Image: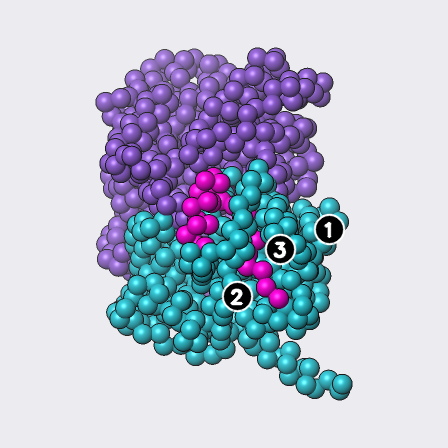
Chain colours: A cyan, B purple
């Protein structure tokens, strides 16, 4: 168990931005609202998944909607708390813990704001280990946690509760439609699960991963070391490409921003080209036609000097970037997960998922903790 | 007449149909106006032109940027945001540096109002609260206010209504409307509006002083100020929106380079004493940066040129063995410290003279340098410039490179990756020329739903509005054309919503 402070919040924001793999929304606004709550004297504690009791009631909370709305109609802040209270009323039970659905991007920090307001601990983990465009793509849904009951709330605390829907794909469709009526962005509370289900399905230690990633980048910047090398030392993975953006193509497909970013190599990659397909998040990286990395592995564009993430919304020609390939969490690499978050799920029938070598940083932290626990005399 | 007031020098040029008649350079004076008077007198005398023959005066200045950076002469302001119950999680000025917030925040309020992306009202205005606020502003003696409503770039009704109310209820209050300054992105637009409000009283004094200085010389032509996107605004508009002058310096020098060389697509190297600033010209305008820009510690979403700077300039220090050049520099002490001027410090300018790239100062002072050392240093200079050019290119092929600025002698006649290296005449005053030839622009930034209308009709309407905005800003309707169209589909809004940003520019009417 550890407590959030302003310095850690700053680092988590940077780490969450990189883990957003091009999407996930900008965590900057969430950072400001959590920082404000901390300055008002509120507290946020982070607990390890191991320390969540079997009979706990863990609820995933956050915001859903269009990032473009989020930068203009900034959150009221307590929308997910209103949704949580509605869900609790429906269940006739109080939540004991909160968890992030998505560590990549804005939703890494929203649960912390709710935790500060509701005085509940946040679990060190999430349902994606990165960012994905749809609800059914989290490990809670993939590994059988029922999607409903689910609740949404808007800036007026208008509430919509879904007592039962057949699955997460259906919830995704219904919730999305409600969100548009709510002005393009809403707070959510779902799914709710027991402590036992959480420990079985959560991608562990991703809050700590975001923290260590951000700390490594900040330290490297401060000490004038290479922040990209520092980032990779924490996340695992490698540099896929160094280059500059020469073309960005965007189109709308069923409400998603899909498109292609093309890069031309710099330094050791001079003479090569890289193509990245994205749907909000980066999906596939191909170098001169050869597939280098595929979803669910993380493909992250970062600024070559600062390791600041470059999202698919702001990427434009001329930017000089480094493309990182980071191995996906183990829980996203199983056959049942790949059916939902592998290349086929995004419409790439002919692309084969070949895992990038290495272990996801969150899994590595979990392994360290297990080794430590074994060493400790009981 | 184009005038550029930089941190070090004030430059002026006199142009007649694109041809340079005269130019002058003088040190910038602390009061700014004295320096302006000197250069203007100088060019008028050189060209033997009567002041009343000048048709327009265009001025670029870093004065307002410096005021924010140095926290000087800033007004205490009221900041009003219309958006409740939305936006409560982050109040206005939340992420400002404490010293700046303490210096300027006179009164801050978060109020009901604003609109949704589709034009629906978030909540009605609270008139009784607004009336109380008007009285409070009067009590506090606040002279300048910023008003920002959620989605005001798309639906400005509430922002305008509150601005009008303040104007009618608080005598003499200067009012900044966020939609006049910024794009979508509430905090960044609100920050820009608040920075602007702090600067308005200073702008009134300064621009009045500029005008008085010009009048003293018998110049009766209208005064325009250059904006960060390379276009002009009237002195009157600049008095109300001084924040739009931020970063106009590099923009002007790139625009000047474009006009002097006759090229619309090229890379510009502006070589100064300490750094080389470089940017890409696309269709005659500087390519814009896509990241949020921080000014004096405040995050904004201005239209800023994408400028890459490296620590290499005419005054860069060269190691005694020639194995390193820069980033440290003798800066403005070049004329005292460089070897060619009788000093003891080996600088990049000394290397350029020793290698025969330039002839200035006293070449005999560098005759003793070993050719190996000179060659080593030259190789480093050329390599760094080539890397800089390459990093700005957007395609693999060689592109023309335009070199301007006082340190331009460092740049070789041929540069890797450059199809040609162009040194236009009057390169030393490219920034003042850029100011003089600037055009006038209009912009729209909105989210439109493509349900019930075609993409083409939505774009056409936005184009027409942008052109209209340019004409309102002073452009000659016959010359207005759209120079930038950006369409970004918005994820998670199934009604096929698209954010459209369009910029139109035209020549100054009657200029």
Question: Cα distance, mark 1 to mark 3?
Answer: 27 Å
The reply to whether dot 1 and dot 3 touch (C-beta < 8 Å) is no
Residue numbers of the magenta segment: A171-194
Magenta highlight on residue B323: no
Q: Which residue is mark 2?
A: A145
Residue at point 67% right, 68% down?
A: A55
Percent of width and height locating residue A301 = 42, 61
Percent of width and height locating residue B454 = 25, 36
Q: Secondary structure at mark 1?
A: loop
Q: Which residue is mark 1?
A: A42
User: How crowded is the residue under tag 3: few (<14 C-alpha within 10 Å), some, or many (20+)?
Assistant: few
Q: Do marks 3 and 2 share a subunit?
A: yes
Percent of width and height locating residue B103 = 68, 33
| First in sequence: mark 1 vs mark 2 | 1
Q: Is residue B218 visible?
A: yes
Q: Do marks 1 and 3 share a subunit?
A: yes
Give the quarter of the figure containing the N terminus of chain A.
Answer: bottom right
Of all chains, the one bearing label 3 is: A
Q: Nearer the viewer, mark 1 or mark 3?
A: 3
Residue at point 32% right, 27% down?
A: B465
Q: Nearer the viewer, mark 1 or mark 2?
A: 2
Q: Is residue A208 visible?
A: no
Decide which of B290, A13 is in the foreground and name it: A13
Q: Do marks 1 and 2 share a subunit?
A: yes
Q: Which mark is residue A91?
A: 3
Percent of width and height locating residue B96 = 62, 41
Q: Which mark is residue A317?
A: none
Give the quarter of the figure containing the C terminus of chain A.
Answer: bottom right
| First in sequence: mark 1 vs mark 3 | 1
Question: Cα distance, mark 1 to mark 2?
Answer: 31 Å
């Amino acid at each position: 168990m550890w407590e959030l402070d302003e310095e850690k919040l700053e680092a988590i924001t940077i780490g969450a931005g990189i883990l957003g793999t091009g999407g996930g929304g900008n965590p900057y606004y969430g950072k400001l609202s959590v920082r404000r709550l901390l300055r008002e004297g509120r507290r946020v504690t982070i607990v390890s998944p191991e320390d969540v009791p079997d009979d706990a009631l863990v609820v995933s909370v956050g915001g859903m909607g269009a990032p473009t709305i989020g930068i203009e109609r900034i959150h009221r802040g307590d929308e997910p708390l209103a949704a949580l209270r509605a869900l609790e009323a429906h269940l006739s039970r109080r939540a004991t813990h909160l968890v992030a659905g998505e560590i990549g991007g804005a939703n890494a920090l929203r649960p912390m704001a709710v935790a500060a307001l509701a005085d509940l601990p946040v679990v060190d983990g999430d349902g994606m280990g990165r960012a994905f465009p749809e609800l059914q793509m989290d490990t809670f849904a993939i590994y059988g946690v029922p999607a409903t009951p689910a609740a949404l709330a808007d800036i007026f605390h208008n509430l919509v509760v879904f007592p039962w829907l057949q699955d997460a794909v259906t919830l995704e469709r219904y919730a999305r439609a409600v969100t548009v009526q709510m002005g393009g962005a809403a707070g959510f509370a779902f799914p709710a699960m027991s402590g036992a289900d959480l420990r079985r399905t959560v991608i562990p230690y991703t809050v700590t991963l975001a923290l260590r990633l951000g700390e490594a980048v900040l330290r490297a910047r401060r000490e004038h070391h290479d922040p990209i090398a520092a980032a990779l030392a924490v996340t695992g993975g490698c540099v896929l490409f160094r280059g500059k953006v020469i073309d960005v193509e965007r189109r709308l497909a069923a409400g998603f921003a899909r498109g292609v970013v093309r890069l031309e190599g710099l330094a050791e990659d001079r003479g090569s080209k890289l193509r990245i397909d994205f749907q909000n998040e980066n999906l596939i990286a191909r170098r001169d036609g050869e597939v280098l990395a595929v979803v669910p592995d993380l493909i992250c564009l970062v600024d070559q000097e600062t390791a600041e993430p470059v999202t698919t919304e702001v990427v434009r020609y001329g930017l000089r970037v480094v493309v990182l390939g980071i191995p996906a969490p183990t829980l996203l690499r199983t056959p049942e997960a790949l059916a939902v978050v592998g290349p086929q799920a995004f419409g790439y029938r002919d692309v084969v998922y070949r895992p990038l070598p290495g272990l996801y940083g969150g899994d590595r932290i979990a392994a360290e903790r297990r080794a430590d626990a074994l060493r400790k005399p009981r | 007449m184009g005038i550029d007031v930089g941190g070090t020098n004030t430059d002026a040029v006199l142009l007649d149909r694109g041809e340079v008649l005269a130019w002058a350079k003088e040190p910038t004076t602390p009061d700014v106006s004295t320096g302006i008077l000197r250069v203007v007198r100088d060019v008028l005398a050189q060209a033997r032109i009567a002041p009343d023959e000048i048709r327009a005066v265009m001025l670029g200045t870093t004065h307002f940027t410096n005021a924010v950076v140095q926290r000087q002469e800033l007004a205490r302001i009221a900041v009003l945001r219309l958006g409740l119950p939305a936006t409560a999680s982050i109040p206005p000025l939340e992420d400002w540096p404490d010293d700046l917030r303490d210096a300027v925040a006179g009164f801050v309020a978060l109020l009901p109002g604003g609109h949704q992306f589709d034009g629906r009202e978030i909540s009605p205005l609270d008139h009784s609260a607004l009336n109380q606020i008007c009285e409070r502003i009067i009590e506090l003696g606040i002279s300048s206010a910023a008003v920002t409503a959620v989605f005001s770039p798309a639906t400005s009704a509430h922002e305008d209504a509150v601005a009008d109310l303040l104007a009618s209820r608080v005598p003499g209050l200067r009012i900044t409307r966020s939609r006049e300054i910024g794009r979508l992105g509430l905090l960044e637009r609100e920050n820009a509006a608040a920075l602007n409000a702090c600067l308005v009283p200073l702008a009134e004094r300064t621009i009045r002083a500029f005008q008085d200085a010009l009048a003293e010389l018998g110049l009766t032509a209208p005064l325009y100020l250059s904006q960060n996107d390379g276009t002009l605004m009237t002195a009157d508009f600049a008095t109300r929106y001084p924040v739009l002058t931020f970063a106009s310096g590099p923009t002007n020098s790139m625009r000047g380079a474009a006009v002097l060389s006759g090229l619309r697509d090229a890379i510009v190297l502006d070589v100064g004493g300490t750094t080389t600033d470089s940017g890409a010209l696309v269709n005659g305008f500087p390519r814009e940066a896509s990241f949020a820009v921080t000014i004096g510690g405040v995050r904004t979403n201005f239209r800023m040129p994408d400028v890459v700077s490296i620590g290499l300039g005419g005054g860069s220090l060269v190691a005694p063995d020639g194995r390193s050049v820069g980033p440290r520099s003798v800066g403005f002490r070049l004329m005292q410290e460089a070897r060619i001027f009788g000093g003891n410090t080996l600088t990049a300018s000394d290397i350029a003279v020793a290698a025969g790239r330039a002839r200035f100062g006293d070449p005999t002072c560098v005759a003793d340098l070993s050719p190996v050392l000179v060659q080593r240093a030259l190789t480093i200079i050329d390599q760094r410039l080539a890397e800089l050019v390459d990093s700005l290119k957007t395609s693999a092929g060689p592109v023309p490179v335009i070199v301007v600025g006082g340190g331009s002698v460092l740049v070789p006649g041929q540069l890797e990756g450059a199809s040609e290296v162009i040194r236009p005449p009057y390169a030393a005053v490219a920034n003042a020329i850029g100011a003089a030839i600037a055009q006038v622009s209009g912009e729209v930034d909105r989210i439109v739903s493509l349900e019930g209308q075609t993409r083409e009709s939505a774009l056409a309407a936005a184009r027409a509005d942008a052109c209209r905005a340019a004409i309102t800003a002073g452009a000659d309707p016959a010359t207005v054309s759209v120079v930038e169209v950006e369409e970004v589909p918005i994820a998670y809004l199934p009604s096929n919503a698209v954010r459209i940003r369009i910029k139109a520019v035209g020549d100054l009417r009657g200029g």
